[in-house]
Image (tube, grey):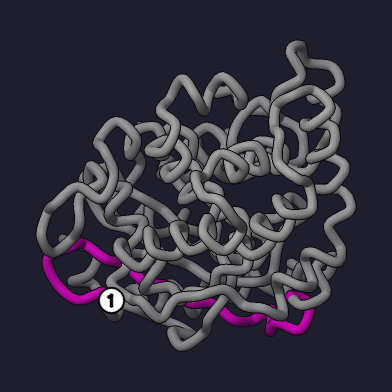
Amino acid sequence: MKICEDREALHVMVQEAVQMASKGKVADYIPALSDKDPHTLSLAVFEGDGPCVTAGDTAEMFTLQSVSKVISLALALMDNGEAGVFDKVGMEPTGDPFNSIIKLETHSPSKPLNPMINAGALAVTSMISGHSVDEKLGRLLSFIHDMTGDASISYNEKVALSEYDTADLNRSLAYFLKQHHVLNDNVEDLLELYTKQCAIEVDATSLAKIGYIIANEGRHTESSRPVMPLHIARILKTFMVTCGMYNASGEFAIKVGIPAKSGVSGAIMAAIPHGAGIGIYGPALDERGNSLAGMKLLEVLSQRYGLSIF
């Protein structure tokens, strides 16, 4: 049975998974995220040959946060090629928190271990082609518009400003990277772009559609034309498996076994190879920054439909 054919079960799974939210906490280190209802949970599943099936609080809009790292990596790879990107950013997972600086200090050469930690994401965002913050952000948004079919998607100005004003740790990471010639950008320009990138606002349906394209060889859902090259879609899925759920990625691979990327807004995007794209939003987080209800929902989905790739 396809997931989308089991609509009643999806609604039940959402109702059961949202009970996990009481054990979590909404991210408050970004002030503009702190007012979200922790008991919100939305799910969208897109299998390409029919409408996107949703359950839960489907009208909720939320910011991508670290889920945007997958999208910016795809664009940077198309702009610079694998050699250009991975000369500056590594390919290895880390057991450290996503905002840690320790590996930059102890690893030689001093380059981020992978594109899914903040230091690596800053380096990747700096590689997006364009002559200004607006041009680079415009290219990123156009890429998202193409994948979702929704040209209205933009960034949340309040969240972007809140992130920019509280981004001192990311500033520290960026200045460290600049000192070691990993990036050459003006740090404040880079922080403006990066915080706006993280504040791009979507709903679960749009997230599921992006996940579907990554899952299915980078091809557009309607025309089957390539939105990104096949080898880049494969790279994205690999990083999602090894690094996508912060320093819980190993445990997630065992329990769920689906390529996925989370963000501290409570967003999770999953891409089942040659299968469905899944978008989830549940803002109550565990101590590692992953949506508690979202993680539980994906675990139940994986077990019920045999989704693990392992």
At horizontal 53% and vertical 23% (from top left) the residue drawn is 86
**Is residue 149 left or right of 93 when viewed as pictured?**
left
Q: Main secondary structure of the magenta part?
A: loop
Q: Is residue 42 above or below residue 142?
A: below
User: Which residue, given by chain and number where applicable, does mark 1 sit on?
Assistant: 53
At horizontal 32% and vertical 58% (from top left) the residue drawn is 277
Residue 32: quarter of image: bottom right
**Is residue 308 left or right of 127 when viewed as pictured?**
left
Q: Please tell me which residue lies in front, 214 or 73.
A: 73
Q: Is residue 42 found inside the magenta-colored segment of the image?
A: yes
Q: Is residue 280 above or below residue 70?
A: below
Looking at the rendering, in which quadrant would you find the N terminus? bottom left
Q: Is residue 133 above or below residue 254?
A: below
At horizontal 31% and vertical 61% (from top left) the residue drawn is 147
Residue lying farthest to the top in this orientation: 108
Disc 1 element: strand
**Magenta stretch bounds:** 33-52
Q: Position of residue 155 (x, y in %)?
A: 57, 73
**Is residue 166 left or right of 239 when viewed as pictured?**
right
Q: Is residue 254 above or below residue 199?
A: above
Q: Is residue 251 found inside the magenta-colored segment of the image?
A: no
Q: Is residue 251 visible?
A: no
Q: Position of residue 160 (x, y in %)?
A: 70, 70
Q: Please tell me which residue lies in front, 232 or 136.
A: 136
Q: How would you rate the neighbour count of disc 1 (Cα within 10 Å): few for under 14, some for 14-19, many for 20 or more?
A: many
Residue 200: quarter of image: bottom right
Q: Position of residue 69 (x, y in %)?
A: 55, 48
